[in-house]
Amino acid sequence: MSHNLESGPGLDGARQFITTNLPILPVPGIPEIRLHKAGPHSGLRHLAERDPQFGSPYWAHYWGGGLVLARYLLDRPETVACCRVLDLGAGSGIVGIAAAKAGAADVHAADIDPYAIAAIGLNAALNDVAVQPVLSDLTTGEPPAVDVVCIGDLFYEAALAKRVTAFLDRCLVQGTVVLIGDPWRAHLPASRLRLLAEYAVPDFGENAAGPRPSGVFAFESSMSP
Ligand SMILES: C[S@@+](CC[C@H](N)C(=O)[O-])C[C@H]1O[C@@H](n2cnc3c(N)ncnc32)[C@H](O)[C@@H]1O
């Protein structure tokens, strides 16, 4: 059964928790965007205690891949302007929000975590953009009718990376452009990527280590020369 928050606080309860406990902070290197971000006193464990299905709260943090791709879209708005965009594995919604700010015609932000869906709605409103949250694992089906799929930091597990890569291959077949932001994680399909830009950005859990180089890539067909 999919997790719809009814075993926990419900969507309204999740929204209320985020609004009350996760401060609104400027995003490092992206002054155009502000997000609800977990801090040391956010008490996410209280949310976890209320919900047996509570997972890792990826939506409450910045990730190197999302930071670098959001920066890229804002620096090169022509990449997504007037396009239908899907932000896959959206987390906080940072990439979809950047796409909307860059002038995308329509933005959907998909995640399998219902808390991410709550966060995306709040963060989009906070940044005064329209982003449609989608609670679904889109990687298992046919690609949606969009012009650009954007992915920030979704290659952190081997099985997930394999499934996402197969989905992206189906996107290429239907003519969809695929852009990926990633801090060179182990399961990135590097042989299929063309580097478009590189920025040094902080990554979750590595703030003490300082910014690290993260890439923005075009995902290309295995038949590309
Ligand atoms: C590391 S976070 C990155 C979030 C955001 N893109 C960013 O860069 O800040 C990965 C996100 O992907 C989501 N996710 C994992 N598997 C997924 C799937 N099959 N479909 C959609 N989202 C997925 C997780 O719930 C999580 O929110």
Image (spheres, grey):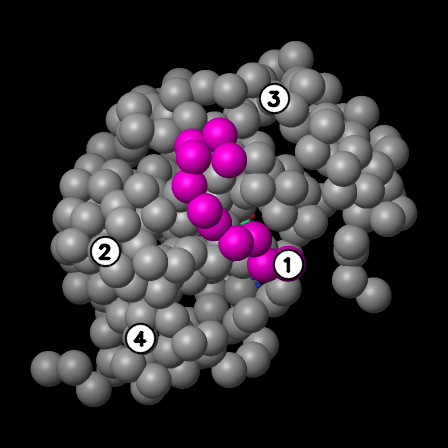
Please name whichever residue, 215 or 96, is drawn nearer the observer in this view of the structure.
96
Which image quadrant: the N terminus? bottom right
Q: Earlier in the sequence, mark 4 or mark 3?
A: 3
Q: Residues within 10 Å of mark 3 (few under 14, many from 20)?
A: many
Find the magenta span and give its range. Answer: 125-135
**Labelled disc at residue 135:** 1
Residue 7 is one of the magenta-drawn residues: no
Q: Residue at x 23, y 33 (%)?
A: 200
Q: Amino acid at mark 1?
A: Leu
Q: Is residue 39 above or below residue 44?
A: above
**Labelled disc at residue 176:** 4
Q: Quadrant of residue 177?
A: bottom left
Label 3 and label 1: CA atoms lie apart by 21 Å
Left or right side of 41 for 34: left
Q: Earlier in the sequence, mark 1 or mark 4?
A: 1
Q: Earlier in the sequence, mark 2 or mark 3?
A: 3
Q: Are marks 4 and 3 in contact (CB under 8 Å)?
A: no
Please name whichever residue, 107 or 162, is drawn nearer the observer in this view of the structure.
107
Q: Which residue is mark 2?
A: 81
Q: Which residue is mark 3?
A: 22
Q: Assign a secondary structure to mark 4.
A: loop
Which image quadrant: the C terminus? bottom left
